[in-house]
Amino acid sequence: MHDGGLVKTRKFADGKYVGDPINAVKIFNEKESDELIVLDIDATVRGTEPDFKLIGRLAVECRMPLCYGGGVKTAEHAKRIVALGVEKVAISSAAVENPRLIGEMAQEVGSQSVVVVLDVKKRMLRGGYEVYTHNGRRGAGRSPVQVAIEAERRGAGEIVLNSIDNDGMMEGYDLALASQIRGVTRLPMTVLGGAGSLAHLGELIRTCGVVGAGAGSLFVFKGAYRAVLINYPSEMQKEELFRAALSQ
Amino acid sequence: MITIVDYGLGNVQAFLNVYKRLNVDARAARTPAELRGAAKVLLPGVGAFDHAMERLDESGMRATLDDLVVRDKVPVLGVCVGMQMLARASEEGVRSGLGWIDGMVRRLDTLADGAPMQLPHMGWNDVVPAVNSPLFDQLESDARFYFLHSFYFECGNPEEVAAISSYGRNFSCAVSSGNIHGVQFHPEKSHHFGTRLLRNFAAL
């Protein structure tokens, strides 16, 4: 979410407006998606609190589990968001800057509802990966492996791994990154960034086994010109995909 | 008309939304006066067992609820912790439950035969209804529901198990005893499967 509307970015920039968030939730209800993640990309960079009113409206509308992230800085924020009917609360910059918050949130709302988002970029010269915050503008100076291990140790319930380099490019996930993180944590993990086709979801599942395959562009755009059209695979398509991916 | 007990826990508005879409009258009750005369009662709940029982007591609606369910035999559906509250007690806390259905709430990890399962049990899972359970009427055989819990309802009478699910081992995820029903999963977060179940409850 950006300026109250829903946007989809490329490499965390160039946000394209894709509609009203409440309306999008209604469409994903009809499509029966497994889960929704809504990230407010203004709150942290503008230093504002989460928009509790809007979150409440999203939660009420949502007929599937919902994860919210953006501007969450305290366990009290997390508690308020869960009380609004949201299943999971995501943190990224706060998890890096104040890792204790992970444990405090877990105390308040339970580990199952604490999600740590890792926005990750490839290192230019030295190789490897680095975690970024503030919509990819601020390098945290730490590797996603380090942050993932710490998140698990402090009581996070889930990791969302997002590749900034692949975001919105629709050319496939960063599978090397995904399997690297899969190898260092037992936490449930959802991978984001790069899915452009159902085959890409299959690739990820084949690489990582049981994993959440998340996508933005794939589910909101149609065709090479990124025409906005919310879409989602049917139950049959999904089952076909899992069967094919896991049988190889 | 469905009356949803609003004692401060659970996503009351999400249930109201589902019923609005189904064209079924529903409203929230926050006081004994608003609860009185209800024809069908939905009892939501999230969080810890003791906290939920305390909040229900503080709401002042408990006595009215007892009258409706036990004396007047009004149909009631407990959801998530609302289901657990139907039991005598819970391993999670020290307070008594409503005691409307014979059973105890137990921790899930005592279920696992081998390696302990990760708790909470969170996510979509298959549900196998008992034969002729009216709550699951017309639900497809591949019905799945969204779960988020660490405790489950262990029925005292096996014939009151209305559905089972599996996490490490089988556990009862729905109970029915006369006019009293409960489901551990979240029908309000389970797409058309959950909508169907809430419609079935409205039609009881």
Image (cartoon, grey):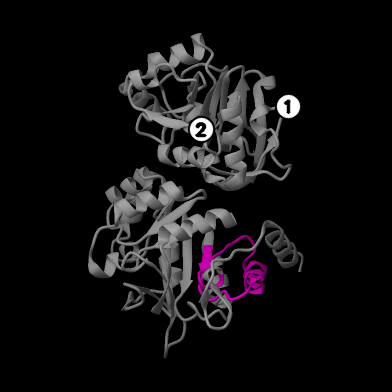
> Residue A107 at what x, y percent from top left?
35, 45
Please name the residue shown 42% across and 88% down the image: A126
> Residue A168 at what x, y percent from top left?
49, 78
Residue A195 vs A43, above or below: the answer is: below
Q: Secondary structure at mark 2?
A: strand
- Quarter containing the C terminus of chain B: top right
Bounds of the magenta segment = A190-218
**Crowdedness of circle 2 by 10 Å Cα count: few (<14), some, many (20+)?**
many
Please name the residue shown 50% across and 11% down the image: B70
Q: Which subunit holds the residue at mark 1?
A: B
**Crowdedness of circle 1 by 10 Å Cα count: few (<14), some, many (20+)?**
few
Q: Is residue A202 shown in magenta?
A: yes
> Residue A19 at what x, y percent from top left?
43, 67
Furthest-front residue in view?
A: B23
| Residue located beneath label 1 in the image | B132
| Residue B150 placement, left or right of A108 | right
Q: Quadrant of residue A6?
A: bottom left
Q: Is residue B161 shown in magenta?
A: no
Looking at the picture, tell me which residue is in the foreground, A155 or B160. B160
Labels 1 and 2 positioned on one and the same chain: yes
Looking at the picture, tell me which residue is in the foreground, B201 or B90. B201
Q: How many marks?
A: 2
Residue B32 vs A173, above or below: the answer is: above
Q: Earlier in the sequence, mark 1 or mark 2?
A: 2
**Which of the numbered marks, if any, corresponds to residue B79?**
2
Mark yes or no: residue B188 visible.
yes
Please name the residue shown 46% across and 86% down the image: A127
Q: Quadrant of residue B155?
A: top right
Q: Secondary structure at mark 1?
A: loop
Q: Amino acid at mark 2?
A: Val
In space, the residues marked 1 and 2 are separated at their CA atoms by 20 Å
